[in-house]
Image (cartoon, rainbow, N blue to C red):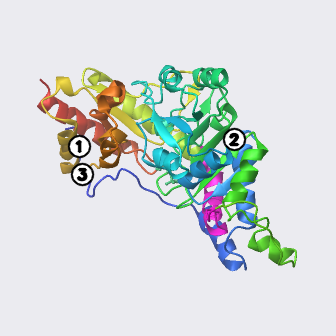
Amino acid sequence: MKSQPPDSIIRLYDLRLSRDTFTQVRGVLDSTWLTAGPRVKEFEKRIAQLSGVRYAAAVNSCTSGLILALQALGLDSAAEVITTPYSFVATAHAINHVGAQAVFADIDPQSLTIDPEEVARKVTPRTRAIIPVDIAGHPADYDRLRKVAEHFTLPIIADAAHSFGALYRRKSIAKNTDAAVYSFHATKNLTCGEGGMVVSRHKVITDRVRLLALHGMTKDALARRNDAGWQYDVLASGRKANMSDIHAAIGLGQLPSFESQQAKRVKLVQRYRENLSALSDFIDLPTPPKHIQHAWHLFIIKLNIDALTITRDRFIEQMRARKIECGVHYIPMFELSLFKAGGLDARLFPNTAFVGRRVVTLPLYPLLSLKQIDYICDTITDIIARYKR
Ligand SMILES: Cc1ncc(COP(=O)(O)O)c(C=O)c1O
C-alpha cells in the first residue's frame, strides 16, 4: 500500500452545504411563507432554464413526479409501461401506484441503461409509455429510444433521478424526452433534502402535474391569500405532493456552485480512471461515449468475479474493513421479494442478472480529495492482488 489509511471511514456519500444555501434558507425562515411560494417558482424557472426547456413543476420527490407524470398521461388500469429492472424500486412502484403494469426490458450491460431493442420487443397494444432510467447519471440511448417511441407513438418519461446536469448530444434529458423527472433527494448531486421536478417541453404535462400535486385544486394557499379570495375549485383527484419554499431554497442555494461541483466530480472520475486502468482484467470502468455528458452521480465499476476468488459481496466487506464504504446500485428488481413473489424471472433479463452480481459503487462526491481516491484505488489494487485467480 502506497497511501495511508484514513482516520475515519470514507463514506459512500457526504455533503457540506454552501453559505449560499444557509442564506437562501434563512431568507425563507425570515419570511412569512414556508410552503409553496416564490422560491418554488424561482427554482422551477432556474431548473427549466438549465434544462433548456420552458416548463417545470416542482414536487416533493422524484417518486411523486413519476407518479404524477404518468397520471398526466391519463393512463388507465389496463395500461402497460415499459421500464428497466435495473433501477431503484421507485421506478416500478410509480407505475404500480397509478394502477398500470410495469413491463420490464433488459439493459445494455455497458451503459446499464435500458436496451431500446428490448423495449421494442416488449411493446403490446396496451403499452402507453416508456420510462428509461439514466443510471448513475449516464443518459439512456435516446436516439434509438426515440425511434422506438416514434414508431409506436409512445411518450418517453425519463426517470432522470441521477441525471440533472447530464447531456445527450448536447441537450438535457428533458429536451430529449417528453418529460424528465429529476430527484433532489439528500444523496443527489443537487439536493433539497427531499424533492423532485417534472421538466418538460410540453406545458400540458407540467400544468397537469402541478394541479395533481395539490389535490387537483385550482388555487394554492398563497394564491388564495394574495388574491384575498377564498374560492377555489377541485378539477381532479390529486394528491399532496408539492414542494415547499424551504426545500426550494436549499436547492437554489446550491445552484451557484453546481457547475464547479460537477467539474470536481469529473476530476475525481479521471483520477479513478488513471489509477484503475491497469486492472482492466479485473475491473470494468464506466466508459461513456463521446456524445454524452455524464452527470457522475455514481461511480459504478463491474468486478470480473470470474477472475477473482471472492464474490462481489466479500469484496465490499474487504473494502469496509479498510474503512471504505461501497454500495450496490442496484439489486435487480427480480431479486427483491415483492417482484419474485410476482413471478418476475431473472432468466428473462440475462444482462441485468450478469451485471447485478458484479456492480460496486465507489465513493464519489465533491468533498472527496484526490488523496482519498488514491487510497481507495490502492486498496482495490491490494485486494485484487490478494484474491486474483
Ligand atoms: C433511479 C431512481 N429513481 C427514482 C428515485 C426516487 O427518487 P426520490 O427519492 O426523489 O423519490 C431514486 C432515488 O434515489 C432513484 O435512484
Of badges 2 and 3, nearer the viewer stands: 2
Amino acid at circle 2? Ser
Q: Residue at x 47, y 35 (%)?
A: 103
* Residue tagged 1: 316
User: In the rendered structure, which segment of residues is drawn in magenta?
Assistant: 239-259
* Residue tagged 2: 51
Q: How far apart are the two marked residues, 2 and 1, measured between alpha carbons? A: 36 Å
Q: Secondary structure at mark 2?
A: helix
Q: Residue at x 69, y 49 (%)?
A: 47
Of badges 1 and 3, nearer the viewer stands: 1
Q: Position of residue 131 (x, y in %)?
A: 55, 37
Relative side of 77 to 44, left or right: left
Which image quarter: residue 196? bottom right
Q: Secondary structure at mark 1?
A: helix
* Residue tagged 3: 323
Relative side of 188 to 177, left or right: left
Q: Residue at x 14, y 26 (%)?
A: 388
Q: Is residue 250 magenta?
A: yes
Amino acid at circle 1? Ile
